Amino acid sequence: MAGNDDFHIVHEADRLTISFQSTMENIDRVDQESRFFLEKGGLQSEIFSVCLCMREGLTNAVRHGHQNNASKIVKYSLSRTGQGLIMEIEDEGDGFDWRAIEKRKPDFDSEHGRGLVIIRKYFSTYAFNEKGNKLTLVKILS
């Protein structure tokens, strides 16, 4: 079981890796670390889009993947490659049927279900693992 302050960060030159206790408050901490990573890498212009999509993915992991169970751990990474950025988000949940979600039209009047629309707007590609508990986003930088 995770401790109350289970938040682990590894900063490397081209990669940020964080594992954290599944709470909404820790998403704010991941946001701060991601902003620092992007600023340090000279990618200030990408902060809005990256952090918006990061928050969408992490919120889904905490709320849906873990049902707000703080004893679960979320894994997050943000990497700079020669051509862009790669973001990975993984939770310990049972996953979900991402194929069905992809086919559904978004209801813009709802408070839910807009995450993939946002991700498609700001990232070049995205993919889920078969189980549906890991999301990989790729952003090609111009």
Image: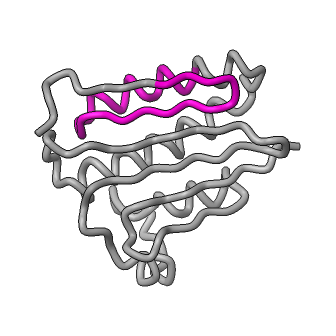
The answer to which image quadrant residue 107 occupies is bottom left
Give percent across and percent down for residue 65. 26, 58
Specify start and end residues of the magenta stretch as a single range.
10-35
- Going by the image, does 23 lie left or right of 90? left
Q: Quadrant of the C terminus?
A: top right
Direction right: furthest residue: 142
**Image color mode:** one colour
- Going by the image, does 135 lie left or right of 45? left
Q: Residue at x 52, y 63 (%)?
A: 116
From what the image shows, is residue 98 above or below residue 23? below
Magenta stretch: includes residue 19:
yes
Q: Quadrant of the N terminus?
A: top left
- Going by the image, does 81 lie left or right of 6? right
Q: Residue at x 56, y 57 (%)?
A: 136
Give percent across and percent down for residue 103. 50, 83
The answer to which image quadrant residue 18 occupies is top left
- The one of 84 and 111 positioned closer to us in this rendering: 84
Q: Residue at x 21, y 53 (%)?
A: 66
From what the image shows, is residue 137 above or below residue 24? below
From what the image shows, is residue 127 above or below residue 8? below
Give percent across and percent down for residue 135. 49, 59
Q: Total of numbered circles in the picture? A: 0
- The one of 43 and 14 positioned closer to us in this rendering: 14
- The one of 58 and 80 positioned closer to us in this rendering: 80
Give percent across and percent down for residue 10. 49, 25
Magenta stretch: includes residue 21:
yes
From what the image shows, is residue 109 above or below residue 36? below
Q: Residue at x 36, y 79 (%)?
A: 97
